[in-house]
Image (tube, grey):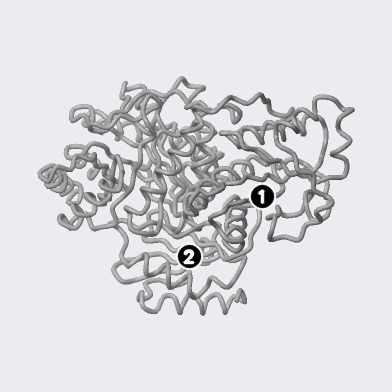
């Protein structure tokens, strides 16, 4: 894949009911119910709303055999009402539930971290080579009968790895790393290939956009090395709600879509599930439109790692570059005398001959672009600057004109997020005729934080909720935010259940995790501090814990 010329990664085709997923088809949009799967009527109504919003596929949790079986009834009711959207059963810890679901729905999602391996304990475990191989044999022995059942029923499989639920076995060899996440997926894919089972989609997700993007790139590289072409599902887990959730999702998903990676996406928001779909649609449409954009001449600077990029080394000019945090033009006080504004194409021309470098001396370069693929255009110019040995800091500047504000948020996050995650820029300048100065500054700072480059506010990691969630997630997120949003630098996780909670919030300062009906457990990092607090009291307990720790 290349950032300079948009082309979809070539994949095989996976059929999920009547929906085909792969590079020969449009990017498919997904969402997930937050109703109890035993609430047949409530689930049916929500699926219909999700389908009406434009989703191609919908997922429901099936934590047990009973829920898996009831998905058959939900599907039956939907078909009676003329709704043909394919359903996916979301399985954790329970292969029997997966087998039951395969009889009733179009796709089953399994998590390699807990499908055969026991749940993550966060204890240091050691495996000899022989013991490790025996564990792999257990996976094959349990997975092959499931593959055969799916073959018999024409059921597709999604192999969904989450950063928060890697098994202790994987952790023992790879740690909590992108390499471990990739290997967790590849173990199952190798068995599927051996058994000639091809109706597979892979997802590999994290709440940290840097980890998510690097891991998917590594997965593509690993699959290419073994001749696998399975389609990919993209998502940033626990992205949160509101603008922050949209920005974080667009940074991670948009970066990969812009590289031609990704065949189906879900934007995971702590909101009504149908609210996810328009955001996903805008992302898919915006990045897919680059297929008709003129290609850009460009090549990576020597030594640049396109899988795990490091920040381009620059000298500091004023408050820009070097070891300074990236700036937001209009928010941060910049010396206009130090800025040299130049379109990306013109900058490439200046760099053709060292004799033309003089205008760049001592300047922070502000690179603009009106290209249909601005990320490719700006990236090409910066890599040429890098290859020439010039260490000027660079600010990327893009004008979104009269694009509606909600779409500008998504487009700017995808564009600037890619440039930031790829280590190319030292600042952002966003222009928009539909957003005021305050909104633009907030967006710019939000993009920097979502890209893990600058922290200016409290960061919230919160799941979108599902049938496993034991409290009103949206209300709870709002209460936690209201009580803690005034503490910049803190990272707080609000998780609906224990499945991914402790793992996805591993780098959070504090975690608020559903522990049963009406109860919450509190974490300090990975450490369980307080169990089974009544939900009505849990926010007060969280504040008390933060005060006791001297964090607020």
Task: List the residue tagged with mark 1.
Answer: 428
Task: List the residue tagged with mark 2.
Answer: 511
Vertical placement of residue 239 versus 197, above or below: below
Q: Quadrant of residue 382?
A: top right
Q: Is residue 316 left or right of residue 83?
A: right
SS at circle 1: strand
Residue 506: image x %, image y %?
52, 56
Q: Residue at x 44, y 54 (%)?
A: 238
Tell me the mark number nearer the camera, choosing from 1 and 2.
1
Q: Is residue 175 left or right of residue 521?
A: right
Q: Is residue 503 visible?
A: no
Q: Quadrant of residue 136?
A: top left
For marks 1 and 2 on the same chain, the one whose residue lies earlier in the sequence: 1
Residue 52: image x %, image y %?
26, 47
> Residue 404 versus residue 12: which sits nearer the camera?
404
Q: Residue at x 20, y 47 (%)?
A: 68
Q: Is residue 230 left or right of residue 399?
A: left
SS at circle 2: strand
> Residue 128 versus residue 262: which sits nearer the camera?
262
Q: Residue at x 42, y 42 (%)?
A: 161
């Amino acid at each position: 894949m290349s950032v300079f010329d948009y082309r979809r990664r070539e994949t095989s085709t996976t059929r999920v009911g009547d929906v085909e997923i792969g590079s020969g088809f449009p990017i498919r949009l997904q969402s997930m119910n937050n109703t109890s799967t035993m609430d047949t009527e409530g689930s049916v109504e929500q699926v219909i709303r999700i389908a009406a919003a434009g989703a191609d596929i919908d997922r429901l949790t099936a934590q047990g055999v009973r829920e898996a079986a009831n998905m058959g009834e939900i599907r039956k009711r939907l078909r009676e009402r003329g709704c043909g959207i394919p359903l996916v059963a979301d399985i954790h810890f329970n292969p029997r539930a997966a087998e039951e679901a395969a009889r009733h729905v179009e796709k089953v999602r399994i998590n390699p971290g807990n499908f055969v391996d026991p749940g993550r304990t966060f204890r240091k475990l050691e495996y000899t080579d022989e013991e490790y191989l025996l564990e792999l044999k257990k996976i094959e022995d349990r997975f092959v009968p499931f593959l055969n059942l799916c073959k018999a029923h024409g059921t597709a499989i999604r192999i969904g790895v989450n950063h928060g639920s890697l098994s202790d076995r994987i952790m023992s060899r790879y740690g909590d790393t992108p390499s471990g996440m990739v290997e967790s997926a590849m173990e199952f894919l190798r068995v599927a290939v051996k058994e000639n089972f091809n109706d597979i989609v892979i997802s590999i997700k994290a709440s940290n956009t840097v980890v998510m993007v690097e891991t998917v790139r590594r997965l593509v590289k690993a699959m290419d090395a073994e001749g696998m072409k399975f389609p990919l599902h993209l998502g940033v887990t626990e992205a949160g709600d509101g603008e922050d959730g949209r920005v974080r999702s667009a940074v991670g998903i948009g970066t990969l879509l812009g590289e031609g990676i990704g065949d189906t996406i879900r934007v995971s928001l702590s909101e009504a599930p149908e609210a996810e779909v328009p955001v996903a649609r805008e992302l898919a449409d915006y990045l897919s439109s680059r297929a008709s954009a003129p290609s850009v001449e460009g090549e990576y600077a020597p030594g640049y790692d396109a899988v795990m990029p490091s920040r381009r080394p620059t000298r500091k000019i004023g408050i820009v570059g070097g070891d300074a945090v990236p700036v937001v033009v209009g928010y941060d006080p910049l010396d206009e005398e130090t800025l040299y504004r130049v379109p990306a194409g013109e900058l490439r021309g200046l760099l053709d001959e060292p004799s033309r470098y003089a205008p760049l001396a001592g300047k922070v370069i502000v690179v603009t672009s009106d290209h249909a693929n601005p990320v490719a255009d700006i990236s090409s110019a910066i890599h040429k600057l890098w290859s020439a040995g010039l260490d000027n800091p660079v600010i990327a500047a893009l004008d979104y004109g009269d694009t509606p504000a909600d779409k500008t948020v998504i487009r700017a996050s995808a564009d600037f997020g890619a440039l930031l995650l790829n280590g190319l820029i030292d600042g952002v300048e966003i222009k928009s005729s539909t957003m005021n100065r305050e909104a633009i500054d907030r967006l710019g700072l939000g993009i920097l934080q979502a890209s893990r480059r600058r922290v200016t506010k409290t960061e919230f990691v919160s799941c979108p909720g599902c049938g496993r969630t034991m409290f009103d997630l949206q209300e709870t997120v709002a209460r936690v935010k209201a009580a803690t949003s005034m503490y910049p630098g803190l990272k707080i996780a609000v998780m609906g259940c224990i499945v991914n909670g402790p793992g996805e919030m591993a780098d959070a300062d504090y975690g608020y995790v559903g522990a049963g009906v009406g109860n919450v457990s509190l974490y300090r990092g990975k450490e369980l501090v307080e169990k089974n607090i009544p939900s009505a009291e849990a926010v007060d307990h969280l504040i008390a814990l933060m005060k006791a720790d001297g964090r607020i």
